[in-house]
Image (spheres, coloured by chain):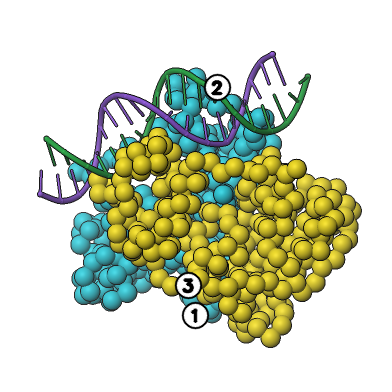
Chain colours: A yellow, B cyan, C green, D purple
DNA sequence: GAGTGGTCTAGACCACGCA
DNA sequence: GCGTGGTCTAGACCACTCA
């Protein structure tokens, strides 16, 4: 039986507040309760509350001002997501009020090449399942993804679902909830990326080349996701 | 007199460890002292030590493994920087053992347009200084940057240095050390970006469109920096 | 001065990996 | 079992903003 992976208290609070923000309960520009207040209301230490607020700030949802309070950011339309937050793409799309969908373009089982083996920490030649999929929001292509997963870690009944539903969903069901991902960010201009009629003419993408890790630092997937430039907005809060 | 902006204890420790890592005192794959050990050695609480380790992890310098310890990442060559860390580009280049340089391409003082005013939180028409500069590492172009700064916040004697030396250096000297930046990440393919003979043929860039903020949430600069794809490596640790 | 966020501490208990 | 990191608490003091 896979571990349920209970969220931390800070994560729960962040999620709670996040939903209240995206649902509009807290309007843009409005102040959210102070740290002390949230502490009392949720019966949490201030450190924990701060951890949650930090997370929301790094997603660009809150602006925290010393001596004043925390305010809901005025963010525009479009799918906007904090790069530092590892979240399912489908979830992100859904929360923006759009309908996520997925189309598998190809799927094959084969031996891992040297590069894949190194990325995934498995042996060269060990079987992997490689999928190519298209991610849509309201029937519009937003990303093309090339994913590689060691076949051995996925229970057979779940294998056919790779590339058909959210990668996160499949991994979670296998008890392999990705906790972290180390991502490289690149700009790519290549008309050969992607497929189908909805492939953008410009062929311009933000590439997230990422290795997904479960808690123990063990890799569960290597994915290269090409986000169509302009259809997904990535935000990062950089701090010193 | 500008505030010296003392670094936090966590930042000091992170910086200390970072230098020891990049200098090779801790080799790749090696374990660094445990949290408890660092606590004792530096006479800091464990929370503070953890804050420092987190920062290094998010820069991709450390891999932290539950039950085992923290290990120096095996990172390859190339200028690699954690997107979540706001650092001077020059500093980043210098630490990679390369020589940073800067060339100002243009500079003008004029009224802020609507977009600039909104980004910087100033009035439309307020005077700004707009600079175009080229950033080099070992005489090779790595980025082109278009920066806009409200003229009023920079003391006149420092104005001529904008675009000639590190933006960070100038701002810091003016007592406006940027603490945070909210950045949008884009892929750009545009042969009109950049100038000079070293302009890459491909015209492909990772664009960081960022507003630099001082502590109080006040914007001090809006910069659009086009990093030549492939010459700078951006890494992000994404977590849930 | 009152209220807010920013930093830090000391200590607790849990979960993981290994011998 | 022991040492490691993961989470959380209660409380302290400081710095900023506004009245």
On the image, the x and y values in percent for residue A144 come to 67, 71
Badge 2 element: helix
On the image, the x and y values in percent for residue B3 come to 25, 42
Tell me which numbered mark, 2 or 1, is placed earlier along the sequence. Answer: 2
Q: Residue at x 54, y 73 (%)?
A: A98
Tell which subunit mark 3 falls on: A
Give the Cα separation between the discs numbered 3 and 2.
Answer: 47 Å
Q: Dot 1 corresponds to which residue? A: B192
Q: Dot 3 corresponds to which residue? A: A78
Badge 1 element: loop
Q: Nearer the viewer, mark 2 or mark 1?
A: 2
| Image quadrant in which you'd find residue A45 | top left
On the image, the x and y values in percent for residue B130 come to 32, 70
Give the Cα separation between the discs numbered 3 and 1.
Answer: 27 Å
Give the Cα separation between the discs numbered 2 and 1.
Answer: 53 Å
Q: Nearer the viewer, mark 3 or mark 1?
A: 3
On the image, the x and y values in percent for residue D14 come to 25, 32
Q: Dot 2 corresponds to which residue? A: B37
| Quadrant for the N terminus of chain B in the image | top left
How many other residues sit within 10 Å of disc 1, few (<14), some (14-19) or many (≥20)?
Answer: few
Residues at marks 3 and 1 on the same chain: no
Q: Residue at x 25, y 49 (%)?
A: A68
Q: Residue at x 50, y 58 (%)?
A: A82
Query: In the figure, A38 relative to B49: above or below?
Result: below
Residue B111 visible in this rendered orientation of the protein: yes
Camera-nearest residue between B162 and A212? A212
Query: In the figure, B180 relative to C12: above or below?
Result: below
Is there CB contact under 8 Å for labels 3 and 1? no
């Amino acid at each position: 039986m896979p571990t349920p992976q209970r969220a931390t208290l800070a994560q729960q609070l962040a999620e709670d507040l996040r939903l209240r923000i995206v649902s509009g309960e807290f309007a843009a520009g409005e102040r959210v309760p102070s740290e002390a207040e949230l502490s009392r209301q949720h019966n949490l230490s201030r450190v924990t509350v701060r951890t949650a607020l930090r997370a929301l700030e790094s997603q660009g949802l809150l602006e925290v001002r010393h001596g004043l309070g925390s305010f809901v950011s005025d963010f525009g339309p479009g799918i906007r997501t904090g790069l530092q937050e590892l979240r399912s793409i489908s979830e992100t799309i859904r929360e923006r009020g759009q309908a996520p969908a997925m189309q598998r373009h190809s799927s094959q089982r084969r031996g891992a090449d040297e590069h894949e083996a190194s990325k995934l920490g498995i042996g060269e030649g060990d079987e992997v399942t490689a999928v190519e999929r298209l991610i849509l929001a309201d029937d519009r292509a937003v990303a093309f993804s090339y994913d590689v997963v060691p076949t051995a870690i996925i229970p057979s009944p779940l294998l056919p679902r790779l590339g058909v539903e959210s990668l996160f969903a499949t991994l979670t069901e296998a008890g392999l909830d990705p906790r972290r991902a180390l991502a490289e960010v690149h700009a790519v201009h290549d008309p050969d990326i992607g497929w189908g009629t909805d492939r953008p003419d410009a062929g311009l993408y933000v590439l997230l080349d990422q290795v997904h890790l479960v808690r123990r630092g063990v890799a569960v997937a290597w994915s290269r996701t090409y986000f169509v430039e302009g259809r997904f907005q990535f935000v990062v809060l950089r701090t010193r």
